[in-house]
Image (spheres, helix red, strand yellow):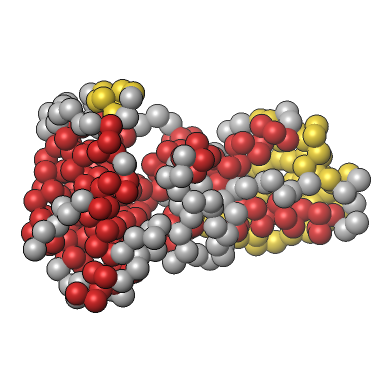
Amino acid sequence: MDPLIIVKPYYQAWQQRAGDMSGVALADGFTFHGPVADFQDAEGYRAMAREAGAAVLGFRVRHQFAAGDLVCSIIDWEMAGMPGTLTSAELLRVRDGEIVSGELIYDAEDLRRAMAPTSAAQPGIGGLLERSHGLVGRILGQITPQGWAAASPCRKWTVRQSANHLTGALLILARVAEGRQVEAAEFDAQHQADTDHLGADPAAAFAAVAARSVAAFAAPGALEADHAFMGTRTPGAVLASISLLESLVHGWDIATGAGLDYPADAEVVLAAWQHAATGVGDHQREAGQFAAVLPVLPTADPLTRLLAHLGRSS
């Protein structure tokens, strides 16, 4: 079989399936060498690809050619947290209809910096929360009675239920960051959606919760401290990132259901991607928190790719 045909699903996995290599013919003894990591079997490489694929914002095969059983590809790709476009060369060796080895060649300094542990303080998270919450608040002020009753893309909720859920979730996360006790039943997503957090003036009600959310994570030490959250201790910086992801994605749910534009902030999308890349995986999907990853075109914008990673189609 033509080696170019054999490697095609490999690149489609990066471009359209967020690194899901389950349908790619990798030999059991597949080995891979790259500037950042090496792998000695297909299972380890597939696990890495699932995690890294969530952070890939763009992936384009610029040139590709085969010489015998060797396929060489020149690739341009963008990754959350990494500035600009990275160009790399990849060599895949094919034997008996399977990919048996791979080597990726590029200057990895920018990627190493992006992958390096960051300060728990996450500079700027407060400003990002304020910007994201502000956009949601403006959208809530534009929704008509018909819009509130319309179906949202989230679960089987109406727009108002999605807005109630978001408001309740942000309030709970703020209370956790404040060191207050939250009962286990309050974490239930359906309970949040069915509780009227919005009242007669949804925009004003949300604005009050949004202000509390920003203030909770701006408090001295709040981001660095570990907080009691769903039976474990969770850093405040992670709770802030969860709040940002909730605000961004449910804001999109609300706007989309109500038929309104959603001009997402590019920096908010990038920060949410950085959290979702490692914070949303198989465990969260199995728990029903997120749907399966959806395929997207390699030219899709970052928000569309993030939504697809969370099981939403824009």
Coordinates of residue 94 in the picture (x, y in percent): 84, 46
Taking 120 as reference, is 249 above or below it?
A: below
Q: Position of residue 1 (x, y in %)?
A: 91, 56
Front residue of 37/194: it is 194
Q: Residue at x 80, y 34 (%)?
A: 28
* 201 displayed left or right of 33: left
Query: How many dots with numbers?
Result: 0
Identify the residue shown where x is 32% and y is 49%: 190
Q: Nearer the viewer, residue 155 or 42?
A: 155
Above or below 109: residue 179: above
The answer to which image quadrant residue 106 occupies is top right
What residue is drawn where x is 61% and y is 42%? 49
Give the quadrant of residue 36. top right
Q: Is residue 185 visible?
A: yes
Return the x and y of residue 230 as percentages of the image width and height: 32, 29
Left or right: 216 as drawn, with respect to 309: left
Up-down relation of residue 119 to residue 10 (above or below) = above
Q: Kindly tell me whether residue 84 is visible in this rendering.
A: no
Q: Quadrant of the C terminus?
A: bottom left
Query: Camera-side residue: 20 or 255?
Result: 255
Tell me: 287 left or right of 127: right
Q: Position of residue 298 (x, y in %)?
A: 56, 62
- Closest to the observer: 143 or 271? 143
Q: What's the residue at 21%, 67% (across, down)? A: 139
